Amino acid sequence: MFKKVITLEKVKELYLERALIQCAKGTYDCYDKHLTKIIDFLNSIKIKKTDQIGRENINAFILNERKINKKNVTINKRVESLKQALKYCKELDYISKNNLEYWRNLPKEPHETKIIDIENLKKILKHVEEKETIRNKALIFLLLTTGIRRSELLNLKAQNFDFEKGLLTLTKTKTNKIRRIPLEERTIIFLSDHLKDCKDIFIFNLVPNSINAIFYKIKKNLGLASKLSLSPHKWRHTYATMCLENGSNLEFIRNTLGHSNLTTTQKYLHLSTKALQSEHARVNPLANLT
């Protein structure tokens, strides 16, 4: 039987063509980044075709990634991206065999996702309300009170907002599913004030580095530690954890964050020490004994 083989570069080209049509831009960029990393490494050790992929060269890639301090979660994304790309090429009959079909993910390292602590959060919000531009007020309060992703923030247009109903409707999402999130009162005020003078198609008209610059300047003005992360993802984690601590159920958090399944959202159960202590105080065996 004739064995069908193509180059790894061709695998990447075919899979990214599919991703360009079917995935959000952020997801496409991730596939592009991870496929490029693993395929460039394999090419560097003379593995250029699909039938040459094997346990030894994948292990070599893993060891190389660990040398540059990449964690298993990142390594898994890179190998898994190639595995899925090979699966796609096999389904299209470009190749006879997916040599990564039985590859299993490396175990995840213990990891605690940190949030913006309450004292720093209070300082930041006080500064934002008193010192920052109306655009920055709208941006920061929106991040904190909705937990939206950076890519979703950058794609926002005026028509995504219904201030009368107090709703934000996201149409450009990671999962390509429309998502609706309630808007908090102060956030509505800042957004409506910002939109009065906004002439741009995208209401914040920023690139990722511009967002980083806003938060860098705020940290500097407040004398906060330079290593303190104020990335949109950190605001997203802070939103979810504080909602949980304020009594929200996981299904509400899942819906507003846009997670496809509850398993992804359940990590916030491990983040909230306050919620853990509160629940323990309520249900421990001595709680209702008098």
Image (cartoon, helix red, strand yellow):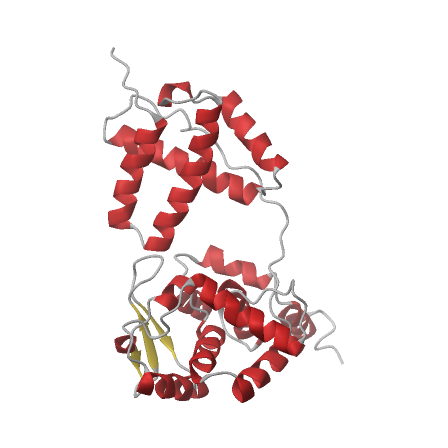
Residue visible at 40% across and 64% down?
Answer: 207
Question: Residue farthest to the right?
Answer: 290
Lateral position of residue 35 relative to residue 244, left or right = left
Q: In the rendered picture of this protein, how many numbered marks are placed on residues?
A: 0
Q: Determine which quarter of the picture holds residue 193.
A: bottom left
Question: Residue farthest to the top?
Answer: 1
Residue visible at 27% across and 35% down?
Answer: 14
Q: Nearer the viewer, residue 150 or 101?
A: 150
249 in relation to 38, above or below: below
Q: Determine which quarter of the picture holds residue 206.
A: bottom left
Residue 139 place in picture, x, y as percent = 44, 76
Is residue 205 visible from the viewing direction of this image?
yes
Lateral position of residue 162 relative to residue 142, left or right = left
Q: Nearer the viewer, residue 161 or 166?
A: 161
Quick one: quadrant of the C terminus? bottom right
Q: Nearer the viewer, residue 10 or 188?
A: 10
Quick one: quadrant of the N terminus? top left
Residue 94 place in picture, x, y as percent = 25, 26
Q: Nearer the viewer, residue 210 or 269?
A: 210
Residue 115 place in picture, x, y as percent = 60, 67
Is residue 118 visible from the viewing direction of this image?
no
Residue 126 place in picture, x, y as percent = 58, 85
Lateral position of residue 220 relative to residue 263, left or right = right
